[in-house]
Image (cartoon, rainbow, N blue to C red):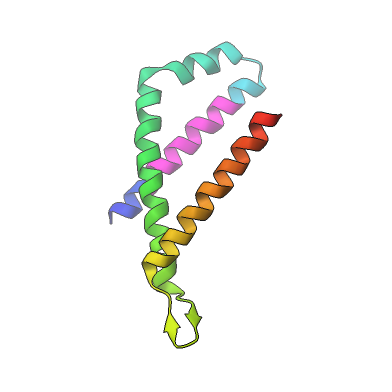
Amino acid sequence: MIREWTSFFVAVFSLIYIYELSLFASGAKDSALTLMRNPGIIAFNVIALVFTLYHASTWFYLIGKVQPIKLGKTTSKPWQALLLNICLLLIISYAVIQILILR
């Protein structure tokens, strides 16, 4: 049940982010930056990050339960899928950050 409630914070974060992007696109850069510096928005972003990480990790764990991989006579455990997906998430995030920094 907690996992389902985390989706609400992800959705609200997405709506705020879309609004910030629309401010940038319309040329109201100062308004967008003011909104991003608002302590309430910063606190909400931190809370949304925690809930998003929880949501992602529980989803990664469920992947291992729903679709275990059979290798010979053994099958994978859910924690192995969690570990693999977290590693992939970190690698892909690092690559995206490097691409954005180099531009």
Residue at (49, 38) in percent of width and height: 14
Q: Is 8 colored magenta in this rendering?
A: yes
Q: Position of residue 20 (x, y in %)?
A: 54, 25
Q: Position of residue 28 (x, y in %)?
A: 61, 14
Would residue 52 be found to the left or right of residue 102 on screen? Answer: left
Q: Main secondary structure of the magenta part?
A: helix
- The answer to which quarter of the image holds residue 22 is top right
**Where residue 76 appears, x then y in whole percent?**
43, 75
The residue under the point 45% across, 76% down is 68
Tell me which residue sits at (69%, 30%) in the image: 102
- Name the residue furthest top: 30
66, above or below 33, in the image: below
Residue range highlighted in magenta? 7-21
Taking depth in this image into account, of 66 and 9 the one nearest to the observer is 66
Image quarter for residue 26? top right
Lateral position of residue 87 relative to residue 45, left or right: right
Q: Tally the numbered discs.
A: 0
